[in-house]
Image: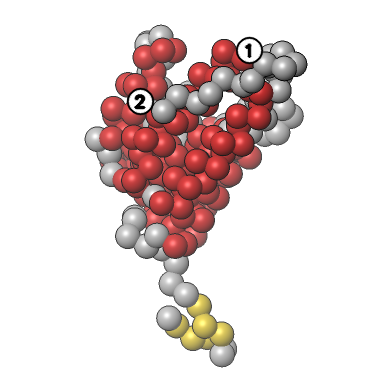
Amino acid sequence: MSSSAGLFVLPSPWSQEAYLKAFRFAATAHKGQSVSGTDFPYLAHVVMVAMEVIAALTVEHSQDGNLAVQCALLHDVIEDTGTTFQQVKEEFGQNVAQGVLALSKDARLGDHHQLADSLKRILAEPKEIWMVKLADRITNLQPPPRHWTLEKKTTYREEAKEILEKLGSASPLLARRLMEKIDTYRSYLQAEQPKGQPGRPPHG
C-alpha cells in the first residue's frame, strides 16, 4: 500500500494502460457494430465482459490481471471482425493472441459442435481465459432476442450450464454470478409455456 498526499492507494492487479490499449484496439475493430437486436454499440458488450472480469480480480488476486482484462476486451475481435491472430499477437503478444483465438468460435464447424470445440481449446489455456468465457456468458444471459424460439433459448441455457461445469473452478465469484444468471434465465423459458403447463425442468 502506498501513500500520496495522505491518501492510501491499493495496488491494482491489472494495469490501466493495458486496459486502455486493448479498449482502443477493440473500439476500432468493432466500429459500426451493434449488439444483436439492440441499438447498443458492440463495444458495450466487451466493456461489460471486462467489468465482470475486473470485479472477480478485485477479490481473486492469484490471476494475471492484464491477461484477463485484455482478453476480455479483445475476445471477439478475431471472431467478429477482420482482425487476424497475427495482428493481435503483434500488438499484445503471444499469450493474449492465443487466449483470444481460443475464445473465438470456429466458423467451419456446425453450431452443435462449436461450443465443444471452443471449450476444449479454452481448457488448454490459462485460467484467465476461462474467466473471460464465464464473464462472456454472464453478460449474454440477458433477456433473449424476441425472434429466438423456445428451443434456442433452452439450448442457450443448457450451454451456459456446461460452461459453468467445465470452467467454473477458475473463479468462484464468476461461477456464482453465472449460476444466478442461469437460474434467472429460466423465467424466459417459463414465459413461453402454455398456461397451466409447467416449465421444462433443468437437466442435472
Q: Amino acid at mark 2?
A: Ser
For label 1, the residue is 149
| Quarter of the rendering containing residue 60 | bottom left
Q: Is residue 97 left or right of residue 144?
A: left
Q: Amino acid at mark 1?
A: Thr
Q: Is residue 188 left or right of residue 176?
A: right
User: Disc 1 on helix, strand or loop?
Assistant: loop
How many marks overall?
A: 2
For the residue pair 173 and 90, the one nearer the viewer reads as 173
Of circles 2 and 1, which is in front? Answer: 1
Q: Of the numbered discs in the image, which one, if any, rests on residue 125? A: none
Q: Is residue 38 left or right of residue 49?
A: right
Of marks 2 and 1, which one's residue comes earlier in the chain? 2
Task: Give residue 53's position: percent from left, percent from top.
Answer: 48, 50
For the residue pair 164 and 85, the one nearer the viewer reads as 164
For label 2, the residue is 118
* Distance in Å between CA atoms under marks 2 and 1: 24 Å
Q: Is residue 200 visible?
A: yes
Task: Give residue 16's position: percent from left, percent from top.
Answer: 49, 60
Task: Give residue 23's position: percent from left, percent from top.
Answer: 53, 46
Tell me the residue at 71%/23% (across/down).
191
User: Disc 2 on helix, strand or loop?
Assistant: helix
